[in-house]
Every structure is written in C-alpha cells, then in structure tokens.
Amino acid sequence: MILTKSVTDILNSSVEAIKGVIPLSVTVSKPSLLAEPFSQHKIGVLIGFTGDVRGRMIIDGEEASFQGLGASMFGMPLDGAMLESFAGELGNMIAGNLATLLAGGGHSLDITPPTVIVGQSKMYGFDKALKLPISIEHVGEFLVILMIE
C-alpha cells in the first residue's frame, strides 16, 4: 500500500480526531501495515466511509479498556448493553470528528452508523490496512484499523 495524500490525510486526521474526542492523555504508536484477516479482541466498533475516500475504521479493545474509558468520560462504570452502546457512540464521535476534519482539508467523507462487534472474531474483505496502536493513560490499549479502498 502506497501512502497517498488521501491516506496520509486520513491517518493524520484520525489521530487528531481521537485526541479531540478522548479527554485523556493519548499516546499514538507508529502505524504499520496489516494484512487480512484481522482478529478482533473483545469489543470493536466498525464505521464505514463513503465519499471521496471509501473504506472502514475499526476501533478494537479489551472490555476493561472500554470500561475504563467510559468511566473516565462519564464518571460511572459501564457494563453490558450500556458498555456496547458506549463503544458504538465512541466510534460515532471519532468518525464524525474525522469527517469534519477531512472536510476542512477539502475531502468529502460521509460515515455509516456504527456496528458494534462483541467477542472473538476475524475480519476479511480487505487487501491491506493500517494498524494504529493507541494507549490511553490510566485506561488501556486500543487498536484503530483503517481499511482504505
């Protein structure tokens, strides 16, 4: 995968969107290429992109990481259906922020409603993707997967 200007813009704007939504210290590690399949951990949220750039974003993490982030953002522990709802809304906020940032850079991007995936799963249907590991202070680790068509 060659990093075109569009892919670089999406990558940089994704980092900015994540840091804009999450009110904690976020450390972003170097992105790397990921070939299929992608094996998801415990909770993930998938959001599709349409418009100038087509693809998908997955935010993947352990249940404890989503719980820690939810407690930090909302001041109360989340579990079960509330935790799954939070994961979907987190993905929606990040992808919405990403679309707004990209619009400022001249890209037209629409997002699909979030799909929350719970449990172990493998995802196919992409050639290569960018894997962006993030660490949130006092919360845990997440992977952001960007599959750009």
Image (cartoon, grey):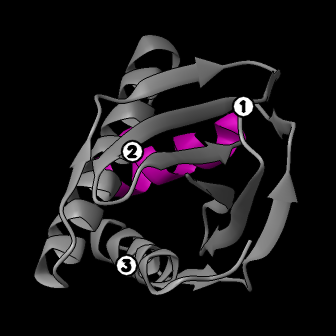
Where, by quadrant of the figure, is residue 114 drawn?
top left
How far apart marks 2 and 3 lie (CA) works out to 14 Å
Residue tagged 3: 13
Reading the chain from its start, which is encountered first: label 3 or label 1? 3
In percent of width and height, residue 35 lies at 87, 52
Residue 127 position in % (x across, y down)? 77, 48
13 vs 97: above or below: below
Q: Nearer the viewer, residue 42 or 132?
A: 132
Q: Few, some or many C-alpha atoms within 10 Å of disc 1 (few <14, some 14-19, many ≥20)?
A: few
Q: Which mark is residue 91?
A: 2
Magenta span of residues:
62-76
* Residue 139: quadrant of the picture: bottom right
Kindly report the distance in space between the C-alpha atoms of the residues bearing marks 3 and 1. 24 Å
**Residue at 55% in and 50% down:** 68
Helix, strand or loop status at disc 1: loop
Q: Specify the principal SS of the magenta part.
A: helix
Give coordinates of residue 143: x percent, y percent. Answer: 68, 57
- Among the two numbered marks 1 and 2 on one chain, the one whose residue lies closer to the N terminus: 2
Within 10 Å of disc 2 (Cα), the crowding (few <14, some 14-19, many 20+) is: many
Q: Amino acid at mark 1?
A: Gly
Q: Helix or strand or loop: what does disc 2 sit on?
A: helix
Q: Residue at x 38, y 77 (%)?
A: 19
Where is residue 91 shown, x and y percent of the image?
Answer: 39, 44
Can you say whether 80 is above or below 90 in the image?
A: above
Label 1 belongs to which residue? 125
Q: Name the front one of labels 1 and 2.
A: 1
Q: Quadrant of the N terminus?
A: bottom right
Vertical comparison of 117 with 27: above or below: above
On residue 45, which mark appears? none
